[in-house]
Image (cartoon, rainbow, N blue to C red):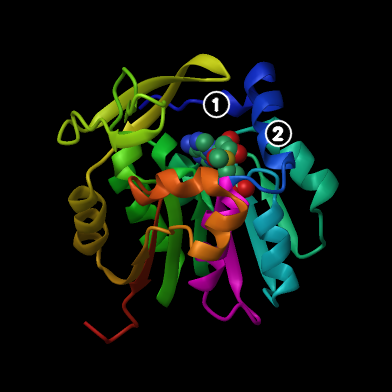
Amino acid sequence: MAKQNIYDNEIFFEGYKKIRDNETNANNLFEKPALFSMMPDLNGKRVLDLGCGFGDHCKRFVEEGAEQVTGIDISEKMLQIAREENGDPRISYIHIPMEDIAQLNGQFDLVASSLALHYVEDFSDVVKSVYQLLRGGGIFLFSQENPLCTCHSGGDRWTRDENGNKIYVNLSNYGVEGERESVWFVDHVKKYHRTFSTIVNTLIETGFTIEKMMEPLPTEKLLEEYPEYQDLLHKPDFLLIKARKAEVGEI
Ligand SMILES: C[S@@+](CC[C@H](N)C(=O)[O-])C[C@H]1O[C@@H](n2cnc3c(N)ncnc32)[C@H](O)[C@@H]1O
C-alpha cells in the first residue's frame, strides 16, 4: 500500500513548522489538552508514539515519568528536529512508517499517536499491530482529524452569510471512505477518510474496549480570547479515542 511522506517535502515542512511555532494553534489550544486529559499514569511506563513529529509528546511522556519512550515517524526531517530539540537518554527516535511497527521489539504499556493516523491507508492493519505490541491492559490513545473534516472532497467547506460569516458546514461524501487529496502548503496532500463507525468497529473487532472519546470544543472563556474558534461549534476538527487491550485472562 502507498505510504506518503509529505513532511519531508521542503515547502510543506516549512509551512507546517510555521503553524506549529505559533503557540496559539488549534493543536495547542484543543487537541493537546484533550489528549493529555485522557492520558493514563505514565510513571515507569514504556510508551510508543506513532508519527511523533518534532517529539514534543515524547519529551512530555518522560517528564511525566515514562521509563522508556520510542518515537517513530516516516519523516526524517521531523525526526531531525525531534532529536535536536527533544532528545533524552530515555527516548529512542526511529525512522520507520507506522505501517511497519510489527517489526519493533518489545512490549508497550501505552501506544499514543497524535494527528497522524489519517495519513494511513490501512487503519485496520496498524490497529492490529498496535494490539500485538501492547501488554494486556495496555492503552491505545490517539487523535486524528475528525471524520467530519476528512470526508471533505472539494469545493468550499462552508456556506457563508452575506457578511462572509460561516453558517453551515458543507458536508458531502461522508459515506464514501478512502483517499482524499487536498492542497495544504503544496498540492496533492493525501489523507484517508473513515467513518466514525469504521474507526470504532475496527478497534472493537481487533479486541479493544473503548474507554473514552472526545471531540474538543472551545469553552466560552476561550472564545472571548479567540473568537475565530467559534467555527468548531459547527464542526469539530479533532477526534480522540482511548482504547484498552484486555488483561490476560480477562476474556
Ligand atoms: C500533524 S504531524 C503530528 C506530529 C506529532 N504527533 C504532534 O502531534 O506534534 C503528523 C506526523 O505524522 C507523520 N506521519 C505521517 N504518515 C506517517 C506514517 N505512515 N508513519 C509514520 N509517521 C507518519 C508525519 O511525518 C508527521 O510527523
Depth check: 205 or 242 in front? 242
> Are there few (<14), some (14-19), or many (20+) residues within 10 Å of tag 2?
some
Corner quadrant of residue 157: top left
Spot the residue most to the left: 175
**Dividing the image into 4 quarters, which one contains the C terminus?**
bottom left
Indicate which disc residue 5 carries. 1
- How far apart marks 2 and 1 lie (CA) works out to 15 Å
Depth check: 165 or 170 in front? 165
Magenta segment includes 72: no
Q: Which residues are magenta?
A: 26-50
- Looking at the image, residue 96 sits to the left or right of residue 18; the answer is left
Give the percent coordinates (x, y) of residue 190: 42, 24
- Residue located 41% across and 26% down the image: 164
- Residue located 67% across and 73% down the image: 66
- Looking at the image, residue 59 sits to the left or right of residue 31; the answer is right
Residue type for callout 2: Lys
The residue beneath circle 2 is 17
